[in-house]
Image: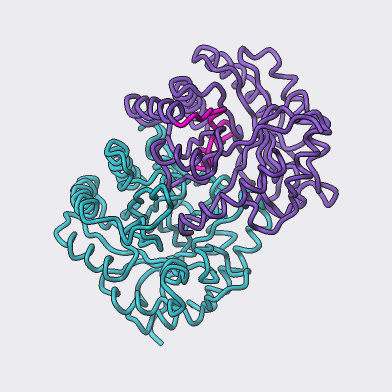
Chain colours: A purple, B cyan
Amino acid sequence: MSTANPLGINLSFCVKRWVTPELWAPVVRNRLDLDLVQFSFDLVDPMWPASLASRHARDVRKAADEHGLTVHSAFIGLAHYTFNQLLHPDPNVRTYAEQWLERAYCFAAEANIPRVGGPLGAIASQIDGHELPSIGAEAYGALVECMLRLGEKAKAAGLSELYVEPTPMRREWPWTIEQARQMMVDVTDSATRWSLCVDWGHGTYQPLYGARADTMQPWFEALNDVISAVHIQQTDYQFDRHWDFTEAGRVVPQEARTLLARTGLAQSPVFLEVFYPFERDSKSILDALEASVLSLKQAFA
Amino acid sequence: MSTANPLGINLSFCVKRWVTPELWAPVVRNRLDLDLVQFSFDLVDPMWPASLASRHARDVRKAADEHGLTVHSAFIGLAHYTFNQLLHPDPNVRTYAEQWLERAYCFAAEANIPRVGGPLGAIASQIDGHELPSIGAEAYGALVECMLRLGEKAKAAGLSELYVEPTPMRREWPWTIEQARQMMVDVTDSATRWSLCVDWGHGTYQPLYGARADTMQPWFEALNDVISAVHIQQTDYQFDRHWDFTEAGRVVPQEARTLLARTGLAQSPVFLEVFYPFERDSKSILDALEASVLSLKQAFA
């Protein structure tokens, strides 16, 4: 067996709970015994006043140093994802979303986080709910142009890599392997490299992809040259669950590790990304996370 | 039987789908056959540039006029709720959250929406996950002071009422009937009246309140003089589900209507508030909403 993937955690579990580095760094380091983190922009809004965002960036850098944590990347959370981002029907909202990303790049650079990513955006639904097969050529063309501008901005900020996270929705992009490949081709000349972060519960969403989508294998095999990060979650393939591994589901950590190795992705960091109901008590979440990380570590050790 | 409650819908179901008034107004009016709306700040971020937010406010006013809709109130959505708002441990984040609300009041006034509300904020979790019994006296005192300042700001903007939405969490406030009563007493002198909007799935969250919390009756009986809006949802009392009424759960619309009438709340508008997974297809959501609204109408007719 080849080298196992570096195992880390997305800070999605910290939202509304361990909201500052002084809180989440010891949870990750001491309670979960991990040293690799993906920061979530559900903890800092890059649109906060510059002095406030800067202070939080310095706090992230300091806490990571003090606790021996590597913050691999910073990812868009559910708060910003809410507003349709770079594909909102209103061009001025799209412009604001682009400015949001520029601010996110500056935050990341100041926090010593070299990579930023997430989903790109969503078009609106039709009034009758009918789904178009995809976002359309014009919207796609403008999106690629925006990604190239963002590549320049990320370079100026000093970042090393930008991520697109494919999502299982026709209203977003890319949602197929072919779209993801085409997009990676179309942004080849970006001043900052664009890569894919794929999520175990996205490529296996059977209501969209069909019953055969019970494995990430097609995504990994077809795109392993452009995938450089992976989100893992427990899920039943019926929704994008983002459960932890104390829940019953279809993802088996040992099989996940084997699949990644077999498809040439043994080097890619794997981040546990889980979301909990706001009302669930924090102690039970830490217990469940501890057990989940343990089972992932046994597989990825 | 006394008059039935006015029935409306919170625009939570529109998030990332029917994101502009040109999209959601016909869905609410023609598809769901409702004329009463609670706007969601998951559709407009009040921190958007003033000219952009103003344009969206005018669009809301225009679409409501054209479709014969009354927009009763505008409520904080999940995006802003994410950042701990007025109880974040960082005082500068709290200040930003207060500014956010001032902008929200101006947006609402320009959109011809007379009331604004939502949850107030959340303290952070302890590193070990242990839950404090409540937010603490100092945080509470500062929160009440902030609410009184906000009362002045809302009056200046021209609003008629502000809402607190109690949530079933010790990290937020108020989460008990007694806390809610005390808070209403403490803000009696506000320049704009503060009221409660209670949610059917909050007061019945049994993991916090115990097995006897299988009804909203205690909340309604104890607080009917300060409740002037109600969120309804289908739920199993085990989590704050925000399901629609095509799901199996514990809430029976006819019993809900009877309880409201019996506790002196027959005048209070009732808003269906449901959330769907981002990846669910929009057509199935409209079908489920149509059936849900129909079953609520049969009860509340």
Quarter of the image that includes the C terminus of chain A? top right
Q: Is residue A68 magenta?
A: yes
Q: x%, y% of residue A282?
A: 46, 55
The number of callouts visible is: 0
Left or right of A257: which side holds B110? left
**Magenta segment boundaries in residue numbering:** A67-89
Q: In the image, is residue B122 above or below residue A28?
A: below
Q: In the image, is residue B29 above or below residue A20?
A: below
Name the residue furthest bottom.
B1
Which is nearer the eye, A111 or B173?
A111
Q: Quadrant of residue A87?
A: top right
Left or right of A40: which side holds A296? right
Which is nearer the eye, B62 or A11?
A11
* Residue A21 seen in the current view: yes
* Residue B54 seen in the current view: no
Q: In the image, is residue B258 above or below residue A241?
A: below
Q: Is residue A32 magenta?
A: no
> Residue at image x 56%, y 68%?
B293
Q: x%, y% of residue B2?
A: 38, 84
> Residue at image x 57%, y 32%?
A36
Which is nearer the eye, B201 or A90?
B201
Name the residue furthest right.
A212
Q: Quadrant of residue A223?
A: top right
Q: x%, y% of residue A81?
A: 54, 39
Left or right of A299: which side holds A63? left
Quarter of the image that includes the N terminus of chain A? top right
> Residue at image x 58%, y 69%?
B245
> Residue at image x 48%, y 21%?
A112
Left or right of B56: which side holds A249? right
